[in-house]
Amino acid sequence: MTPFRTKKQELIAHLRERSNISDERVLSAIESVPREEFVMESMHHAAWDDISLPIEEGQTISQPTVVATMTQALELTDRHKVLEIGTGSGYQAAILSRLCRRVYTIERHKPLLDSAEKLFKTLDLGNITTICADGMKGWPRIHGQDQHPFDRVIVTCAAREAPPPALIDQLAIGGVMVIPIGPPGEQMLRRYQKESEETYSYRNIMPVRFVPLLPDVNKGDKKAKKEAAEVEAA
């Protein structure tokens, strides 16, 4: 038995017994996605520990307990279309892809998105669509076509006070959004449900730590900014 397999089994047992993850579909999805492929090589030894890890561009890959909790809170079915804000390493999107019909994921750092796209191809995850764009604006119209409404929205970076209005607008009535809210050090993971075009409710899930949700694409990436501008003009 490989060290990765042993640590993977230990993590799954931990999630089931100590982290209140009871959805077996979520646990199976986590078990099926090789987390070691989504972290830096120097971090491979810790890939299946229940901790967040650094990745490129000053970002992080979330702690497995948080990934599992957010995924379980979405209550996904294989018919759902999901919008993810903050592709990061691609790990969360890979797990979502095992549980829903299609994932649309937005990342503001082009180098991160390029790496994630390569992994999606390597792992044969053909139901993930990616774009480098401003996640606060939701999924952009491309060639005159919209993809919303989305059945589920998951945000892997923290909004300071409330979900961006564009994300609420793109969520289907009856749909669910899972998003961290609050300033650094005071963030709470929340589950929102859209009740009508004008109203939604939410409940708190757990305290968390996430990087902030920022507007626009990465200011230092001229190529990404050019591509985002072309999308907005389409």
Image (tube, grey):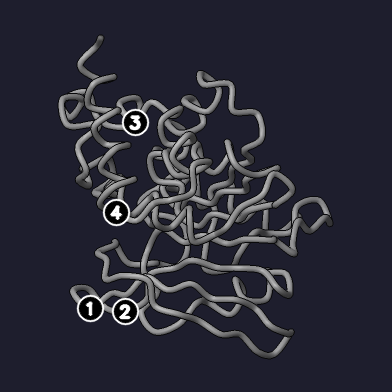
Measured in 3D between alpha carbons, the distance from the residue under mark 4 to the one under mark 3, in whole angstroms, is: 18 Å
Q: Which label is found at residue 35? A: 3
Which badge, 3 or 1, is on the more N-terminal residue? 3
Q: Residue at x 41, y 48 (%)?
A: 109
Q: Which label is found at residue 182? A: 2
In-image side of 50 versus 146 (left or right): left
Q: Quadrant of residue 13?
A: top left
Give yes or no for contact between labels 3 and 2 (Cβ–Cβ under 8 Å): no
Which badge, 4 or 3, is on the more N-terminal residue? 4
In-image side of 50 versus 218 (left or right): left
Measured in 3D between alpha carbons, the distance from the residue under mark 4 to the one under mark 2, in whole angstroms, is: 23 Å
Compare residues 10 and 137 and report the one nearer the observer: 10
Which badge, 4 or 1, is on the more N-terminal residue? 4
Q: For the view shown, which residue lies furthest in the bottom direction?
A: 198
Q: Secondary structure at mark 1?
A: loop
Nearest-to-viewer mark from 4 and 3? 4
Q: Which residue is mark 4?
A: 19
Picture coordinates of residue 136 (x, y %)? 52, 68
Q: Secondary structure at mark 3?
A: helix
Amino acid type shown at disc 3: Arg
